[in-house]
Amino acid sequence: MKQQYQHRAPSRLTPPAHDSADPNPLRPCKSPPSILGLLTVYLFFHFFCFFSLLLQQGSDQWVQSPPHSAKVGSSAPSTQAVSRTLFVGERIALHRSSASPYFNDIPAMAALSGGEGFICGILANTSQVYCWSSKSAGIDLMPPIYRTTAYSHIAAGKNHVCAIRGSYFSDQDSGTVDCWEIVRNSTNIFSSRQSTLLYDQSISSLVFNKVVSGEGFSCGGVREGGIICWGPNSASLGVSGISEKFLVLASGRGSFCGISKVSNEVKCWGRNDSYAAPPVGISFVSLTAGANHFCGIRGDNHGVECWGIFNSSSVPKSSGFMAIASSDFLTCGIREDDLVLNCWFVNSPSPPDYDPPLELCSPGLCTPSYCNDGQFAYNASLLNEPDLTNLCARKDLKMCLPCGSNCSEGFFLSSSCTETADRVCTACSLCQNSSCWDVCRLQSSREVQQKHRHNLHRLLLIIGSSVSGVLFISVGWCLLPCLIATRKEEGTKRQFKSCMRKPELESDTNPDSQPHPVTPCPGMAQVFRLSELKDATNGFKEFNELGRGSYGFVYKAVLTDGRHVAVKRANAATIIHTSNREFEIELEILCQIRHYNIVNLLGYCSEMGERLLVYEYMPHGTLHDHLHGGFSPLNWSLRLKISMQAAKGLEYLHKELVPPIAHRGVKTSNILLDSEWVARIADFGLITSNDNDRSGGLECDVHNLGIVLLEVLSGRKAYDRDCTPPRIVDWAVPLIRQGKAASIFDRYVALPRNVEPLLKLADVAELAVRENPSERPTMSEVASRLEEIVKDGLIF
């Protein structure tokens, strides 16, 4: 395995270079490009990310990629955007230093599919089809009769292509089907012709909304429901009398499968060897096919399931995926945790020999419309990339992905799919109320109590009869309520200890499982068991991850008492480079900090070498999410209040604590919003006792808060490589000093009738970001000024 295949943190999403004929930049700060242009650029990058990395085996192999099912404005899952990406059947040596012959002077595409030695794609600007090959790059292989026809879906088989008429970017995603053949002569020169083998008079008047192609056959999903196949090899598929509708279709060489719209389960037809033992009782959201294998993304945990002829040991088990696509013997998926490609040979345990791209891969298409039912808008801030807040070029564009359909065995649905987040499944061990009893097959608390009471009665009767003494029975009845009350108290008691005491834990035969004792601090912190936090976070699974940083990972957790908290888990580097004493000192300080505008510490765990800090959970995410990450936009009144509250929290750290604490990392992603939209400061660190260092840290916090204020005013990121100048300070401060502060206001939010508070906020920001620290105000002065501005802003 090459080093590139090791798990690594994702790099920034770098869109491809523009065509020289396009005078508009990809992401202008002042003149947003057209929606179609954005989709074109991102689709081009989309298939580049997959297509430019694959080294396909075999010179005479063909491959069929599943047809697209995600369209702008349609209800189909957008994860299928990647399944439309084609992997070419001929062996192509792809290197970063030399471009693939398939991409020389090829226009931007909205969809791709291909067969043995050729590719066909739907042009992004006209929806017309363009076909080409490596042997005849630059020559359109489309039959002249079809060159001016617009198509919405396309699917290539071994040596033929079928496409559905209609505009790709139209809400109308159905139409009649045209088919043509791609012919290769003895000198490897390709040409095309109208297909006689694939022509079927019985389907000429039918309206289809999906199409796939295999070796000598094509199949389509009829708009009213059902599947019809045609071509010389279609009879061998055994398709007849199918009336149901399907979300996705995918075709191999001699078979095809579909995801039922009713059950979300897979059904297959064709040669049994290529789809042997398809999974039963599992829901899927995405599907892809190779020569003799199929793979799909599960709806419950987004893991990959494969069937047909494949090596089960090669299929990744540790990651969930957002999109998936296949060639003959190779399958690639985009991991949902970091949007990095993961590829594997289905018939070999060895990793494929290819050079993956350095950029992230887009898992779908950007759309200006709202996500449909059963979809959520992908939040790129989950990647924890400072310069990446949205995979789309504009904040008003969304990337809609399918919601998970069910939860795995042993889990229940604790949070439904929303507009901005997928549904959350929680372990049944955390089931606390009647809403999950049936799913987890648990009895109600009353039934459990009655069962326990009945068993105790039987036990007492046995004891009473054995000793034959009424006195003992009477004593037993008297002691029974006390025993029940004692057990209940021991079972429900929470250990709130000060940091100075070792927690009282139940006996454990393993001495290593005891928590590391922590030295005194006057505050009160709850001592958690490691097993308790593992259950609360579903074993620290990635789908519970809220974010990550240099310290480690932060997970969402649901405690047994129903409280939602955030668990901060130190990574190995943090544990290695900080001693137990340093952790104790930090814990002593954190125990003392309590403020309305601070994310307060609730407890900790230090078992088994782990360092876990438990904080209050902030359900509305970060300020960064709402300004740059596609979350709901904030109105001006709320932006002013959040700015003031953030300054109040920092003022508390600077002024009220002795010695003061400098945050040293003030930014929008460290300003969290609680259930009442109150700003809370998070991820602050400790400063040294050196007076000079302390002063510099406090002044740095003022400067960084000034940058946050500029982001609040403009909606622009602190550093945006696609803007000129890229640093927000270099762009905004000169305009403010020229009296043109209004020109930096976020134009995606309607201006209030009274803009005076916003102008005053711009003045405070300008003072805070001055290069000379002595010219900056203190945090207390900033907080006081912002408090006055908020009062003025109430007359918006």
Image (cartoon, rainbow, N blue to C red):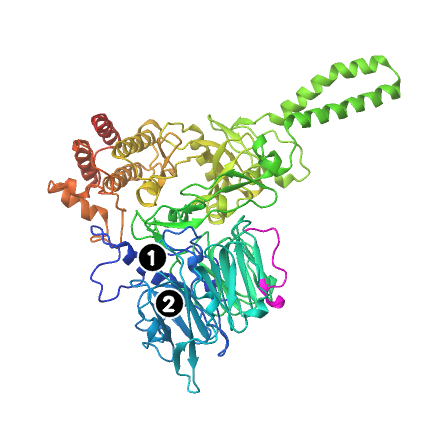
Q: Is residue 549 visible?
A: no
Residue at screen point 78% across, 22% down? 457
Query: Crowding near pointer 2: few (<14 within 10 Å), some, many (20+)?
Result: many
Whether 534 is drawn above or below 199: the answer is above
Which of these two is toward me, 769 or 152?
A: 152
Q: In the displayed structure, would residue 391 be above or below residue 775?
A: below
Magenta stretch encompasses residue 278? yes
Q: Is residue 662 visible?
A: yes
Q: Amino acid at mark 1?
A: Phe
In the depicted view, which residue is nearer to us: 47 or 121?
121
Task: Give the magenta part as a residue range.
Answer: 269-283
**Which structural element holds mark 2?**
strand
Label 2 to label 1: alpha-carbon separation: 14 Å
What number is the disc on residue 169?
1
Considering the numbered disc 1 on the image, is that residue within a helix, a strand or a loop?
A: loop
Residue 648, compared with residue 154, is above or below; it is above
